[in-house]
Image (cartoon, grey):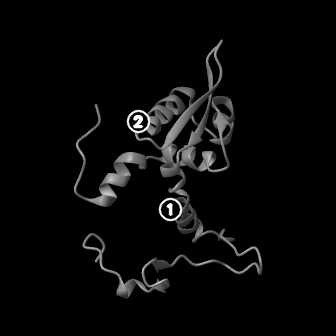
Amino acid sequence: MSAPRSDSPLEEAVARVGDRWTLLVVDALLNGPRRFNELAEDVAGIAPNILTQRLRHLEREALVFARPYSDRPRRVAYELTERGRDLAGALRLLSEWGSSDAEDPEYLRHTACGSRLAARWYCETCERAVDETEAVDSEFV
């Protein structure tokens, strides 16, 4: 049974994917479907029982789908659902923030010119980038 949901959007997100291993599993799946052993290799240091727990949790949250590729023995490849792929932007921002104090920080770069990319809020109605001072969100104001 899942825990009661919070009124805070950030608390809700943390409850769904807020531990170290879960985010690293999602990150490994951003490159496409992976089998269990591939994920265990991609997520350095994760114990098999922890990987199993995290994958089951992500399936319950509808962020990961287990696609069978063999019936006997039953084997599956794990892949992100569309909702799971929606985490890509947040993970990129967290990665950039995590490397910001490093000697050689890693940034997402524009393939055409190599310049560092900056995250911006975008209004779909106005079809333009919006500065944070123009945004209203009761949780972050």
Identify the disc placed on residue 60.
2
Q: Which residue is mark 1?
A: 90
* Residue at the image point whose x is 45% and y is 77% from the top: 124
Judging from the image, what secondary structure is the residue with disc 1 in?
helix
Task: Please give left or right for residue 11 compared with residue 105 in the image.
Answer: left
Residue occupying the far front of the picture: 125
* Amino acid on which the number 1 mark rests in the picture: Ala
Q: Nearer the viewer, residue 66 or 22?
A: 66
Q: Nearer the viewer, residue 121 or 23?
A: 121
Judging from the image, what secondary structure is the residue with disc 2 in?
helix
Residue occupying the far top of the picture: 72
**Vertical placement of residue 132 versus 99, above or below:** below
**Vertical placement of residue 17 versus 41, above or below:** below
Q: Nearer the viewer, residue 54 or 50?
A: 54
Q: Residues within 10 Å of mark 1 (few under 14, many from 20)?
A: few
* Image position, residue 9 (x, y; %): 31, 59
* Image position, residue 132 (x, y; %): 40, 83
Mark whose residue sits in front, 1 or 2: 2
Task: Please give left or right for residue 59 compared with residue 117 in the image.
Answer: left
* Image position, residue 50 (x, y; %): 50, 31
Identify the disc placed on residue 81.
none
Label 1 with label 2: CB-CB less than 8 Å? no
Task: Please give left or right for residue 72 compared with residue 13 in the image.
Answer: right
Q: Residues within 10 Å of mark 2 (few under 14, many from 20)?
A: some
User: Which quadrant of the rendered structure holds the C terminus?
Assistant: bottom left
For the residues labelled 1 and 2, the Cα–Cα distance comes to: 20 Å
